[in-house]
Amino acid sequence: MKDPLKKVTPSKDAIGESAERSDYSANPRLALSVPVECAGQRLDAILARLQPQHSRTRLQHWIREGQVAVGGVVAREPKQKLWGGERIECSQAPDKGTLSSLPEAIALNIVHEDDALIVLDKPAGLVVHPGSGNASGTLLNALLYYAPELENVPRAGIVHRLDKDTTGLMVVARTLVVQTDLVRQLQAHTVKRYYQALVRGQLERGGTVDAPIGRHPTQRTKMAIVKSGKSARTHFRVVERFVDCTLVECALETGRTHQIRVHLTSIGHPLVGDPVYGGGPSRVPVGPAFERQALHARRLGLVHPATGKAMLWKSRLPDDMARLIETARLRALAVLSAVDEDDDWDEDLEGGPEVIYVRGDGDVERDDEDEDDCEQ
């Protein structure tokens, strides 16, 4: 039996004219034979079975980019059905974003690392991926410098993101196999991500926001709850209430862009400091303005891809957010103390207060037992 994973370099004739036009042959190719038992299955599902080290999303991207040919003809539809026995040729193109990025000596706060993964604590202001306006100085650039082998892993091993000004824990895969495992854990919800956020207003109780998120229909730099968006679910619980804000913990089932910020804004409690969804920099009444969203990825749990053991990491709140919460806490204590003093003022009066009743006709009666005794 032929080895379905055997690498070959087919000729241009074997690839076909349409494959030549897509130029996928410029990259290393893998030739695969479709098992007979896969008859009737989708192309992307068959590739995922034959190439388990790649995520299905990545394989679908290869198909749509013209990097996969079936029987010498480029296939651009992941849903294409195969009948067994076909020859699949796919080019394993390197990740363009990683190749175009240069290593940069940017300090990283490494919480844990081993041969499989890196867990780091991201500071505020650090962009995760290069993009428009951020071609360098990103986490990806820093990872390429810290671990040069990540050049061979798509997106330098990054499997999930944090917004530029969101702080906290992230996991990075050191190999393609580990990255695929972590992506599948994210899809299966075995990666647990817990965030702490300070929101405006007083939340009475926890709950769940289940609402689809997509690009804002008119403001393209924002996300919004839209019917055509991707499903998104955020669980939240109250940690501590203050005078005009609430500290909450959020747990994500999905990882949509700006998910916590959009979901909490939708229930009337935008994050303190959120410049996009909070109507500009917002602040607690006492203390300096807080000019970024008060959001921190505080706990991260997952099943280690190599050992199979459940692991959990925790991160302290960054100094600026800790000071913000302490300011809110001290103000709440001051207000509570003032209320308590007003309630208990009469307990300090020796013998208790004099009770005075005013009748409807304006006459005054005094409830004074000592005075009655004197009259007797």
Image (cartoon, rainbow, N blue to C red):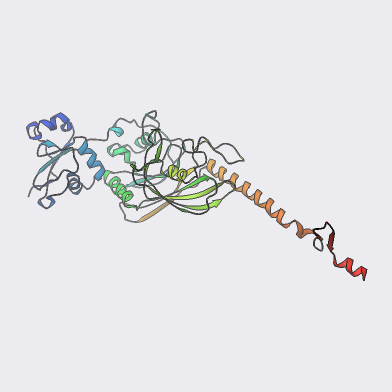
Left or right: residue 246 versus residue 88 is: right
Left or right: residue 55 versus residue 71 is: right
Residue at x 76%, y 60% (from the top left corner): 347
Left or right: residue 46 versus residue 148 is: left
Count of picture labels: 0
Most extreme residue toward the right is 375
Q: Splitting the image into 4 quarters, where does residue 343 fall?
A: bottom right
Most extreme residue toward the bottom is 376
| 90 vs 286, nearest the viewer | 286
Left or right: residue 173 versus residue 365 is: left
Image quarter of the C terminus = bottom right
Q: Is residue 50 visible?
A: yes
**Where residue 69 appears, x then y in whole percent?**
14, 38
Against 252, is 135 above or below? above
**Where residue 162 appears, x then y in whole percent?**
41, 41
**Where residue 208 appears, x then y in whole percent?**
43, 52
Residue at x 85%, y 67% (from the top left corner): 369
Most extreme residue toward the front is 361
| 144 vs 334, nearest the viewer | 334
Q: Splitting the image into 4 quarters, where does residue 159 fall?
A: top left
Q: Can residue 92 be seen in this view?
A: no
**Where residue 39 appears, x then y in whole percent?**
11, 50
Residue at x 54%, y 44% (from the top left corner): 322
